[in-house]
């Protein structure tokens, strides 16, 4: 017989940014509430798979390193990230894997050198606040918008665990990000159409879960405004001042800037992992999944 009890994890350090995310919050775009959810759905699904959870079960999504957590009782967890390294008490581990953390154990993320986001999944999921059918943290929707030092989150402690597993994830090479033209793309002159996706653009360090800011275009586009229109995650917008950005999971659901392209939904996760300060190359195609 499998017995389960409520246990708690305490956040000792948050690193740069960490939050609870799941598969997303759907059906509320008309209220101005975005989907939120995992930035890299494929990687989060892998973390959940390693502990036997549904692929959209809530995980802790963290940016880079220094997240540190103490577990009140033993916990079967998975850490998924490209070449991630972490420690449990005094022992150091490398790579994506599931592992049993002992009672009172402290997990600390040491390094995530090549990508932005990684995931911590726990058997049974995290029992954090649920709003509108989702546990995804977001400012203005949930009580807390991210993890804070000293806070606690409940989880289900159980005596049932699977064997520890490890998966090798190599450093991925950068690839083109597929896009299709947006509604206002044809309003640009031919010369601007060619220029806007002709060369790689740098992802600004000012980027976040709301939008990835792109640098390298910077040409004024007079009257590049419209009446507010639908802007799902993956919308590439261009302002009159020539500033370009991609709306991400927590981005606004409507906007008044030119929508010059939409990113393939399967490429949004890959875009999210390109390190800030690196460059991205958009590739215009016709057959795309939105």
Image (cartoon, rainbow, N blue to C red):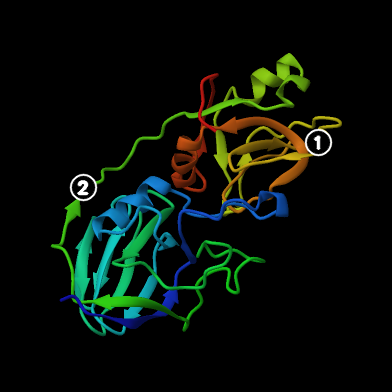
Screen quadrant of the C terminus = top right
Q: Which mark is residue 258?
A: none
Q: Residue furthest right?
A: 223
Residue situated in front as seen by the camera: 123 or 181: 123
**Residue shown at the point (50%, 40%) measured from the top left:** 268
Nearer to us in this view, 227 or 112: 227
| Residue 17 can be seen in this image | yes
Q: Residue furthest front?
A: 1
In the displayed structure image, the side of residue 162 where residue 279 appears, left or right: right
Residue 84 visible in this rendered orientation of the protein: no
> Residue 149: horizontal and vertical position, in percent?
48, 80
In the image, 66 versus 11, the foreground residue is 11
Q: Which mark is residue 168?
A: 2
Q: Residue furthest left?
A: 163
Residue at x-position 61% and y-position 51%: 27
* In the image, residue 85 above or below residue 243: below
Q: Is residue 37 above or below residue 174?
A: below
Dot 1 falls on a residue whose secondary structure is: loop
Nearer the observer: mark 1 or 2; the answer is 2
Residue drawn at 25 percent across, 46 percent down: 169
Q: Quadrant of the N terminus?
A: bottom left
Q: Is residue 165 left or right of residue 187?
A: left
| Residue 72 to residue 98: above or below | below
Q: Reading the chain from its start, which is encountered first: label 1 or label 2?
A: 2
Check contact, mark 1 vs mark 2: CB within 8 A.
no
Choose top left, top right, bottom left or bottom right for residue 22.
bottom left
User: Percent from the top left, x then y, of residue 130?
Assistant: 52, 69
- Residue 91 position, x and y percent, is 18, 72
Residue 244 position by quadrant: top right
Relative image position of residue 55 (x, y in whole percent): 36, 52
Q: Which mark is residue 240?
A: 1
Few, some or many C-alpha atoms within 10 Å of disc 1 (few <14, some 14-19, many ≥20)? Answer: some
């Amino acid at each position: 017989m499998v017995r389960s009890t409520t246990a708690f994890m305490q956040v000792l350090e948050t690193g740069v940014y960490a939050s609870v995310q799941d598969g997303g919050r759907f059906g509320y775009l008309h209220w101005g509430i975005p989907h939120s959810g995992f930035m890299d759905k494929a990687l989060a699904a892998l973390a959940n798979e390693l502990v036997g959870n549904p692929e959209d079960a809530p995980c802790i999504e963290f940016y880079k390193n220094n997240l540190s957590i103490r577990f009140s009782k033993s916990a079967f967890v998975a850490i998924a990230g490209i070449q991630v390294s972490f420690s449990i008490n005094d022992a150091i581990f490398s790579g994506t894997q599931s592992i049993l953390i002992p009672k009172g154990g402290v997990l600390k993320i040491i390094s995530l050198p090549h990508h932005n986001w990684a995931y911590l999944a726990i058997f049974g999921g995290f029992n954090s606040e649920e709003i509108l059918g989702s546990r995804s943290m977001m400012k203005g929707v949930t009580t807390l918008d991210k993890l804070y030092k000293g806070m606690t989150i409940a989880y289900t402690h159980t005596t049932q665990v699977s064997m520890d597993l490890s998966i090798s994830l190599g450093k991925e090479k950068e690839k083109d990000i597929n896009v299709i033209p947006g509604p206002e793309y044809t309003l640009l002159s031919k010369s601007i159409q060619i220029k806007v996706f002709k060369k790689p653009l740098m992802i600004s360090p000012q980027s976040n879960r709301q939008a990835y800011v792109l640098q390298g275009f910077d040409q004024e586009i007079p009257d590049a405004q419209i009446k507010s229109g639908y802007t799902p995650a993956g919308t590439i917008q261009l302002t009159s001042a020539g500033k370009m950005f991609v709306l991400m999971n927590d981005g606004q659901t409507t906007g008044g800037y030119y929508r010059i392209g939409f990113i393939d939904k399967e490429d949004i996760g890959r875009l999210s992992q390109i390190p800030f300060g690196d460059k991205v190359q958009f590739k215009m195609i016709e057959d795309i999944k939105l």
